[in-house]
Image (spheres, helix red, strand yellow):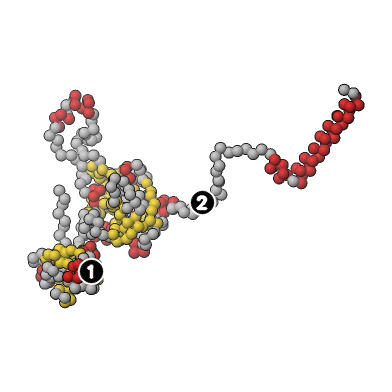
Amino acid sequence: MHPSLSKKLWLIFAQTTTLCLALLFVLRTFAPHLLENLSPQKKSAVLVKYAEPSLGLRSAGSYSLAVKKAMPAVVNVFTSKKAADNPHQKYLDDPMFRHFFGDQFEDNDGQNHAENSLGSGVIVSEQGLILTNNHVIASADEIDIALSDGRKMSAKVVGTDPETDLALIKIDAQNLPAITFASTDKLNVGDVVLAIGNPFGVGQTVTQGIISALGRTHLGINTFENFIQTDASINPGNSGGALIDTEGNLVGINSAIYSRSGGSMGIGFAIPASLARQVMEQIVSLGNVTRGWIGIQAQDITPELAESFKLKQAQGALVAGVLKGGPADNAGVLAGDVLLAIDGKPIYDTGSMLNLIAALTPNQQASLSIARAEKNLNLKVKVGKRPKPLAKK
């Protein structure tokens, strides 16, 4: 290559390089964003959004404060029952039989026990009182409680009320985290609620839903029914656990579910905290639950019966039978009468009638409004004490 041509090419290269460096200096000084757009981006494996620091505040839509307040007051309930004498015990004692089938037929104490059952409970006093369902502990020979702090201890039954499916048990402990009761008369359909319990024995679990309905009756679950219906998931093991509001206050004791499979189908029922408190206070003060009773059998008024009795509306309770010598019989109530009100409080059906009569004080006078032969009568009845229900065999 000719020396002069080589010199010219080198001069061009040097000038071009100097111009590019000068342009780069100007861009970096006065328009750095143009260089950032040109630079290759490092791609993340996952596209994520990072939240700003919360500074310790609860994020919107979280119920963590309510759960932290209520969860320590919810316990796990374990029950066991000693099995009846086994006629095949001689086979169980046979070493060869036990070699193949193991020792699953004996508990740690060497005695035969039925399989453990599982439920939940709610601490209602710092002195160790716990509310749960009666069906959780009804047939138990032994009751053990597991607290949220990991402690385990045995419990004894203070009192039960099978007609509301409630039971009060006690553990020997002090300064326990007791639940706070909510004012259940302020509940509304659509309110958010949380269910806390130990479903299927997996451990303490919280589920969320709303109140689907209030005052559910005629379910055939208990004698006295006034259930809160919720779609918060309630499964086996949740029985006796807490249904709380978004402030961590107790609104109900989880009791039953409607299910075709044994699992939650979005229809659960809880005993209102107000009813649970009434039962608890009677058990503590009296040792049992006392209810009013007048000795009648009744059935709901249908539209056909209302028309037959010439009633203005299909509400009230038709007296189907009167116990001879009972309070209603002594007051002059007859089969075929329609009970319309008790102490001025209207009766809508047999469920409301049972609840109104149960709320009466034994040995006190009550006023019965009755429709008989197209006439309205007022009768005075001396309220009796409701007999204890027969134990189920």
Q: Secondary structure at mark 2?
A: loop
Labels in figure, total? 2
- Quarter-wise, where is residue 88 in the image? top left
Who is closer to the viewer here, 99 or 369? Answer: 369
Q: Residue furthest top?
A: 1
In percent of width and height, residue 351 lies at 23, 62
Dot 2: within a 10 Å radius of its alpha carbon, few (fewer than 14), some, or many (20 or more) residues? few
| x, y percent for residue 166 | 25, 54
- Residue at numbered disc 1: 314
* Vertical placement of residue 207 versus 99, above or below: below
Res. 384 visible in picture: no
Q: Is residue 191 above or below residue 98?
A: below
> What is the x, y in percent for residue 392?
16, 50
- Name which quarter of the figure residue 33 lies in: top right
Residue drawn at point x = 11 percent, y = 72 percent: 332
Instruction: Please say whether residue 257 is visible from this viewpoint.
Output: yes
At horizontal 80% and vertical 37% (from top left) the residue drawn is 20
Q: Secondary structure at mark 1?
A: loop
Disc 2/disc 1 C-alpha distance (Å): 57 Å
Q: Residue at x 8, y 66 (%)?
A: 325
Whether pointer 2 and pointer 1 mark residues with C-beta atoms closer than 8 Å, the reply is no
Q: Quadrant of the N terminus?
A: top right
Which residue lies at the image location 91% right of the left edge and 26% below the top edge? 4
Q: Residue beneath label 2, please?
A: 56
Report the amino acid beneath label 1.
Ala
Foreground mark, 2 or 1, reads 1
Q: Is residue 1 left or right of residue 342?
A: right
| Drawn side of residue 195 relative to residue 107, left or right | right
Residue 123 position in % (x across, y down)? 32, 52
Which amino acid type corresponds to the residue marked 2 in the rendered image? Gly
* Sooner in the amino-acid sequence: mark 2 or mark 1: 2
